[in-house]
Amino acid sequence: MIDEQFCTHCAEKKTKIFCRVHKKVKRIYMDAIGREWHGSRCPDCYAEYKKNYDAARRLKKGHTPLGTICVCDHCNGQFELTQGRDAKICLKCRREGEY
């Protein structure tokens, strides 16, 4: 069942396709690409909301903010922190498996 619905956050008309029922109660909807809707937020709005929510949660817990320039523990090179990790190792060292 294909339905056109307005996202309550971006106010754009988006396609919402019924996919299945989860645990006989919750109805699961997808967009045209196959990404899942989360309540009244379209998948694009939800991705932005989730990014901001996770960043605020990281700061509240005392972690290093994403986007911070860090020094690699292995090669001493600078890199931008894009994922939450305990060890601060650059992508180059992670790929080479030298840590």
Image (tube, rainbow, N blue to C red):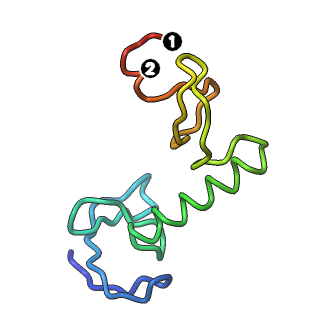
Asked which quadrant contains residue 14, the reply is bottom left
Which residue position holds label 2? 93
Residue 16 point in image, percent of width and height: 29, 75
Asked which quadrant contains residue 18, the reply is bottom left
Q: In this view, does 99 lie above or below 35?
A: above
Q: What residue type is labelled 2?
A: Cys
Q: Residue at x 36, y 87 (%)?
A: 12
Nearest the viewer among 95 and 42 is 95
Q: Is residue 47 above or below residue 4?
A: above
Q: Distance between the residues labelled 2 and 1?
A: 7 Å
Q: Is residue 10 above or below residue 87?
A: below
Nearest the viewer among 87 and 37 is 87
Nearest the viewer among 86 and 90 is 90
Nearest the viewer among 25 and 39 is 39
Element carrying mark 2: helix
Q: Is residue 82 above or below residue 44?
A: above
Residue 3 point in image, percent of width and height: 26, 82
Which of the labelled discs sits on residue 25, or is there none?
none
Which residue position holds label 1? 99
Q: Which amino acid does label 1 sit on?
A: Tyr
The answer to whether the residues at label 2 and label 1 have Cβ atoms under 8 Å apart is yes
Quarter of the image with the N terminus is: bottom left
Q: Residue at x 39, y 65 (%)?
A: 27
